[in-house]
Amino acid sequence: MTVYVYDFAQGNKDQKDLLGGKGANLAEMTNLGLPVPPGFTISTDACRAYLAAGTEPAELAEQVTERLSALEETMGRRLGDAADPLLVSVRSGAKFSMPGMMETVLNIGLNDESVHGLARLSGDERFALDSYRRLLSMFGSTVLHIDSEHFSRALDAAKSARGTTADLDLDADDLRALVETFKQIIRDQAGREFPQDAREQLDLAVRAVFNSWNTDRARLYRRRERIPEDLGTAVNVQTMVFGNFGMDSGSGVAFTRDPASGNQGVYGDYLQNAQGEDVVAGIRNTVSLADFEQLDKTSYDDLIAIMAQLENHYRDMCDIEFTVERGKLWMLQTRVGKRTPGAAFRISRHMRDEGLIDADEQLSRVTGPQLASLMFPRFDANAEKTLIATGMNASPGAAVGKVVFDSPTAVAWVERGEDVILVRKETNPSDLAGMVAAQGILTSRGGKTSHAAVVARGMGRTCVCGAEALDVDVEAKVVRVRGGGELREGDVISIDGATGEVFAGAVPVSPSDVVRYFEGEDVDADVVRAVEEVMGHADSRRRMKVRANADTAEDAARARRFGAEGIGLCRTEHMFLGDRRELVEHLIVAEDAAGQEAALDALLPLQRADFAGILEAMDDLPVTIRLIDPPLHEFLPDYTELSVKVALAEAAGGADEHDVRLLDHVRRLHEQNPMLGLRGVRLGIQIPGLFVMQARAILEAAADRIEAGGTPLPEIMVPLVASVRELDVVKRDILAVAEEVQAARGVEIDVKVGTMIELPRAAFLADRIAASAEFFSFGTNDLTQMAWGFSRDDVESAFFSKYFEHGIFDVSPFESLDQRGVGGMVEMGTQKGRATKPDLKVGVCGEHGGDPVSIHFFETVGLDYVSCSPFRVPVARLEAARAVLGTDA
Ligand code: PEP
Ligand code: MG
C-alpha cells in the first residue's frame, strides 16, 4: 500500500520531492524540537495520482482519517466539534516555492455550530466570527472558485457602513452580519450551501490545492522558472494558531539576513492582531522586528534564538513565517530564503568567513544567472518609466539612445557623439556596423536566436527583439506603437534587455561594478570581493576550459580579460562586410580565374590584418578561426530590390551594365532555403580560392606573429561538413598552403585543421570524420536547426509560443540544449570521434556554450571546452566549476 500521508514528525528537510518544500521544512523544525503547530503532510505522490486519474487515490481518505484522529488525540479536540473544535489550515507546498501561485485555506473546521464553541472557548466572540468570515471567503474563492471581489466588496461595504476603513473596527455584530452575507454570496455564486461538515471542508480544500497545480498562472510561473510540469504539490494540514486573537497576538515574516543586500543581521516585519495573509496583503502597516521587541520581548527573544538555531542548522539564510498567539511564539514555515544576486554572493562569502560553509559550498551557492545579472548595467529602480512595448529579452542590459532606423545613420550619429538605439523590423549581416555602434538594438520581429539576438549577445550589446506591438516603418522612419503614439528618428527611448521592456524617454542607468572589476579596474565593493573569491575557486575546480566566440581583436582582448582561455569560434563572415563587400561582389561577378584571383588578392591583406590582431590579443592561447560559412548572396544586394532597380532603369532608357551583370549573378545564387544551400564547406568546394585565401591569411598572420616573438596557436575550422570526403577536399588545399607559407617564411607554425559538427550526418559519422579532423567543435545552433528542422531565423516568433503552451518544451531548444535529442548527437559524436582518436579535442561553440544548464550537460559528456560570447565567459567559468561539483545549474 502506498503511504500518502505523513505526520510532521516523520519527515525531514531532504524530502522535498515527497513532502514539498514547506512540508519537508515543517518536519525538520518539528524534529528540531521547535514550536511547530502539529499536523501532517499529504504527499506529492497523492497529488500526482489525483492529477493522473482525476480522482483521489482510493487509500487517501482512510489515511487522512487515521492521521486526523491522531492529531485530534494529540490536541484533545475534534475537527468541527461544536463545543471544542480543532481548526486546521490547508496549504499547498510544492518542491520549489511558487509564491502566490497556489492555494491556502485557513480555519477549516468552523461552521454555524463550532463558531459558538470557539467563541466560548476563547472568550472572544468577535475573534470567532472574524475567523469564520475568513474561512467563508477563502473557501468560497479557492474551493468554489467565486471571484474574491464579491467578498472584498461586501467587506468594504461593512466597513463603510461603520464609517471606517480598518478591519479591526468591525465589531461582533458587524461580523455576524458579514458571515451571513458571505454565506449568501456562496449560495448565489456557487449554487450551493457552504459545507457545514468539517471533513467535507477538509477534503474539498485538499482537492482544491491539488487542482491549483494546474491553474494558468501556476503553469506560466513554472515555465518561466523552468520548474517541471509533472512534480505536483504536497498539501500541509496543520493545527491553527491564531495571530488574530487580540493585541497580544500577531503574525510576522523574518529573514536571518537581509535578502536584498546580504547584510548580516535579522530583518523582518510583524503585524499585531493579524493572520499571516494580512502581513503579505499589506492591509495595515507592519512594524519592524525592533518594534516587535518593544511589543513582546519574550516572543522576540524566542524568535531570535530560533533564527540563530535555524541558520546554524541549515547553514544558510532562512526565511521564516511565525505567529504569536496570546504571547506564545509558533513557527509556521521556514525555508532557505530567496535573495537578490548581490546578496547571494555576499552571504555565501560571509558564511564562509564565519566558518559555516567551505569554499565548494560557497561556489555551489551562487549561480551563473546571478553573476550575469550583476554584470549588466541597470535602470535605476526608482526612476519613473513609461512602458510602450514588451518584446523578447534577447540580450540583457539597459540601453538609452535616440531612435535610428538604419546602420549608416547609427554609425554617423555615434561618430558625432550621440547614443543611438538601432530600430529595425529585423536585422541582417549588413546592419552589423550599426549594431556595433548602437547602444542597443530593438526589433519588432525575430526570436532569441534571430540574427539580431545572436550578434547582440556576442557583442554584449543590449537587445530586445520581437516587440510585436511596434510597427517599424523603416522607409518612413517611424515606429507606430500599437495602442497609440509613434516614435520618429531622434526620439529617445530606453530598452531593458533583461526584461524585454521598451520605455519612452531616457531612464537613468548605472554601470556594473562587477564588469568594471573584470575589465581590470580596482573597485572597492564587498560584492566584487565576493565575486573575485568565488571565481578564483571556480577556476581551480573546473575541468572544462572556457573559450570565447570573438571576431575582432577588441572582443578577443576583452574576452581574455574576462578569463577566456582562447577563442572557440571566430566567425570570419563579418570580415566581408562594409567596404569589403564590393570585393566579394568582384569575386562573384568575375568573368574568369584571373578576375577571381584579383578579387581574392585584394581581400588577402585585409584578412591577414584581421587575424593578426586576434592572434596577438590571444597570444599563446588557441584561436579557432572558422572559414566563411554563410551563402554568398548574403553579401550581394537584395534580389527584389535590384530587379526593380534594373527594370525601372531599363524602362527609362537603359540600365547600368554592371547592375545588369550583377542581377544575373544574384539570380543565379538566389536560394529558396539558403540555410540548406551553398554555404560552409560547400562554398569552399565551389570556390576553392576563397578558403585558400583565408587559410593563407591566417598562416601568414601567424608567421608574422612568430617573427615578432609571439606564440600564435591558430586552429582552422571548416563549417557544415557532413562527409569526411568534403573535409578531405578542402583540407588538402589548406595543408598545401601551410606547407608553402612555412617554407617561404622559414618558420614552423603550430596549426591544426578541424571541423564543426553541426549536421546530424556529421554526428552519426563522427568516427569517420575524426580520421581527418584534429578537433571537433559542435555547432549546436545549426545542429538544433537541422535536427528539429526548425529554421532558426523564423520559428521562435512564428509558433514557439504554442509549443510552450502545449508543454512541448519548457524552454527554446535554441537557448538551452535539447539534451535528449541534440544532446544525444553531441554525446554520440564525441564518443565516435574519440573512438577513432582518443585524444581528439572536442568543444562546443553554439549559443549553448554560454547557457548554464547546457554547460552542465557538456560536463557530463566530457567535452574539453565550451565557447561563448565574451560577456558570458565569467558565467561559463562559474558554471563549468559548479558542474564538476554536481550542483544543479
Ligand atoms: C552553430 O551553428 O552552432 C555555430 C556556432 O555556427 P553559426 O551560429 O555561425 O551557424
Ligand atoms: Mg553553424
Image (cartoon, helix red, strand yellow):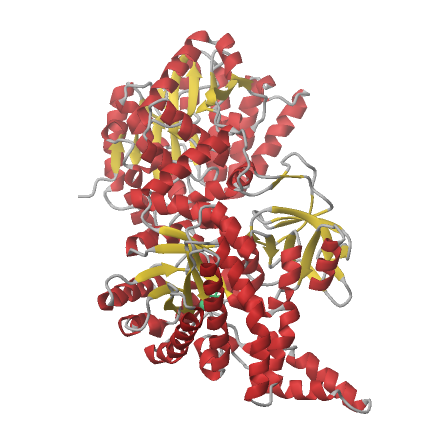
Query: Which quadrant of the frame does ligand 2 lie within?
Result: bottom left
Question: Residue at 49% of width from left, 45% of height from top?
Answer: 561
Q: Is residue 434 left or right of residue 350?
A: right
Q: Nearer the viewer, residue 511 or 1?
A: 511
Q: Quadrant of residue 207?
A: top left
Q: Nearer the viewer, residue 541 or 364?
A: 541
Above or below for 456 versus 275: below
On the rendered image, what quadrant is the N terminus found in?
top left
Question: Residue at 55% of width from left, 77% of height from top?
Answer: 632
The furthest residue to the left: 1
Above or below for 588 versus 187: below
Q: Nearer the viewer, residue 725 or 192?
A: 725
Question: Residue at 51% of width from left, 8% of height from top?
Answer: 294
The furthest residue to the front: 746
Does the image show residue 376? Answer: yes
**Residue 717 appears at what percent x and percent y?**
41, 68
Above or below for 635 versus 9: below
The furthest residue to the right: 652
Q: Nearer the viewer, residue 494 or 560?
A: 560
Q: Is residue 850 left or right of residue 66?
A: right
**Residue 748 appears at what percent x and percent y?**
38, 65
**Residue 447 appears at what percent x and percent y?**
55, 61
Above or below for 208 versus 122: below
Q: Quadrant of residue 162?
A: top right
Does the image show residue 37? Answer: no
